[in-house]
Image (cartoon, rainbow, N blue to C red):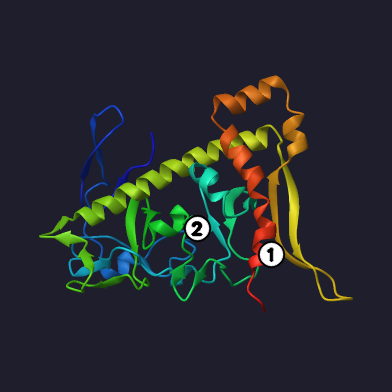
Amino acid sequence: MGCQHAIAGFELEKRSSAGVPMKSATKTKKPPTEEQGAQVNGAMPLYDAPQAVHSVTHREISVRTGEGSFSFAEKAPIIEVTVDEFERAALDFPIVFVGESLQPFVIMGLEADQNQFVSAGSYRPGVYVPAYLRRHPFVFARDEGSDALILCLDHASDRVVKAGDTGAMPLFDGGEPTALTRQALQFCENYEAARARTLVLIGLLRELDLLEARQATRAGAEGEDATLLLEYQTIDVAKLDALDPDGFQRLRAAGALPAIYAQLASQANWQVLAVTRPAA
């Protein structure tokens, strides 16, 4: 059975793909205090102060909607993506697999603290915005002691304001979640589903041994060694070409081929990043 998803203290009725109502909630418990709400487990890159969304602690909190600031991502050169995003993201960024988990990321900068696509809080027009960034300032966090995922809000975000702020929408109205809160919950649920599909792809790439380790480096000045930027893995074209028919059929049956071809094509964007990198 998959994880349950909820707004703390609420049971939200959703529809499954078959149209059958299902409850998405945690067990009833006392509403968290502001301090308890801030106790979110697990690393959440770009989320500095996540708190569980709750009708009591967030009754006077609103979120600015529309084109928000991306200042929170200005110093993030790599951003997590899911397999659902590969085909579109491949048009703008290199897609790589990082670490033991082989989590896919897009490369958005060639400096440790610089995102080449965000400047003064503005995102470069016409460039794909990863779902990880579009989800902000909302995120799911695992509820301690259960298998539920709780909707949280990053209070460090400049989009989070007091109720009544011009251009902002409240999280709750009369103690009930507003359309904004329900939409955020749905977005986070969709993102988690995409992450699950991403794990399937990663499992296939591991099992069929289709990855190879690489390093991204920047040439040093004359007489100096190159600087290591990132150790990562990418799909090996030679291994893919040598795959036996049964293995290739497994990729086809899993719907993995479009994502694989997109990841391979995305590697051309390393050169684009190098050419467009801001001068030091």
Indicate the position of residue 102 as horizontal and vertical percent values: 62, 47
- Which percent across, then down, holds residue 158? 35, 73
Total marks shown come to: 2
In the image, residue 246 sits, relative to residue 150, either above or below, namely above
- Amino acid residing under circle 1: Ala
- Taking depth in this image into account, of 53 and 72 the one nearest to the observer is 72
Provide residue 182's location: percent of width, then percent of height.
24, 51
| Residue 91 appears left or right of 84 | right
Residue at image location 37% in from the left, 50% down from the top: 145
> Which element is circle 1 on?
helix
Q: CA distance from mark 2 to mark 1?
A: 17 Å
At 56% from the left edge and 24% from the top edge, which residue is drawn? 253
Q: Mark 1 sits on what residue?
A: 274
Residue under label 2: 127
Q: Is residue 139 left or right of residue 77?
A: left
Residue 226 image offset from top left, x and y in percent = 81, 68
Amino acid type at circle 2 is: Val
User: Under tag 2, what secondary structure?
Assistant: loop
Which residue does the image show at 58% across and 65% down from the upper left?
A: 77
Whether residue 66 is visible, yes or no, is: yes
Q: Is residue 38 above or below residue 206?
A: below
Q: Earlier in the sequence, mark 2 or mark 1?
A: 2
